[in-house]
Image (spheres, rainbow, N blue to C red):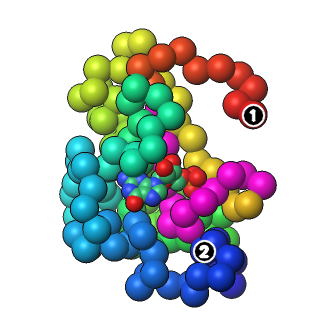
């Protein structure tokens, strides 16, 4: 298993902060929701607009997608997440100026929450390299 839960925390949905947010057990500033995907404002924003788009179902990280199955269900999920990110960018007024979409994968990728999420960052010019 390649579950990306932080060390010392059991893998699985019960202890997953984003599963709990998706279930409404932990409050969040939600900006979009449908049957598969939600978007919430990051609790520690790194830009004037910083939204996280995540699937309701527990997926440990982007590396899970295609790990065993390159089929339509997995690829469609990521497509939906990107489409929601683009909608959030439009709704938050950063679509024209531009924005950055980021997925951190695993320890070296800087992933701290082991539930797939796409960062939408905007409202200021982004720098490169990202560090
Ligand atoms: P990662 O480092 O895994 O790519 O990103 C995790 C993000 O989740 C961080 O930007 C962090 O601020 C955010 N985050 C962690 N816990 C919570 C929470 O309880 N609520 C919200 N809205 N964001 C969170
Ligand atoms: Zn989860």
Residue name at image x 50 percent, y 84 percent: 12
Q: State whether residue 71 appears in this view.
A: no
Task: Where is residue 17? Give x, y as percent.
Answer: 42, 70
Secondary element at tag 2: loop
Q: Check residue 116 for magenta coloring.
A: yes
Rendered position, 7 above or below 87: below
Q: Secondary structure at mark 1?
A: loop
Residue 22 at x, y percent in the picture: 30, 67
Q: Main secondary structure of the magenta part?
A: loop
Out of 2 and 77, give the one closest to the viewer.
2
Mark 1, residue position: 131
Q: Residue at x 63, y 72 (%)?
A: 6
Q: Quadrant of residue 36?
A: bottom left
Give the Cα distance between marks 1 and 2: 23 Å
Residue 7: image x %, image y %?
68, 77
Categorize mark 1 by other alpha carbons within 10 Å: few (<14), some (14-19), many (20+): few
Sequence-earlier tag: 1 or 2? 2
Is ligand 2 closer than 8 angstroms to the Cβ of mark 2? no
Which region is colored magenta? 108-121
- Can residue 35 be seen here? yes
Q: Residues within 10 Å of mark 2 (few under 14, many from 20)?
A: many
């Amino acid at each position: 298993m390649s579950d990306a839960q932080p060390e010392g925390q059991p893998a699985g949905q019960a202890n997953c902060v984003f599963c709990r947010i998706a279930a409404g057990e932990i409050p969040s500033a939600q900006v979009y929701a449908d049957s598969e995907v939600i978007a919430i404002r990051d609790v520690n924003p790194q830009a004037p607009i910083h939204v996280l788009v995540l699937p309701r179902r527990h997926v440990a990280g982007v590396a899970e997608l295609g790990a065993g199955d390159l089929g339509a269900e997995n690829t469609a999920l990521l497509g939906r997440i990107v489409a929601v990110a683009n909608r959030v960018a439009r709704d938050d007024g950063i679509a024209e100026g531009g924005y950055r979409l980021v997925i951190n994968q695993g320890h070296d990728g800087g992933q701290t929450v082991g539930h797939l999420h796409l960062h939408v960052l905007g409202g200021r010019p982004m720098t490169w390299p990202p560090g």
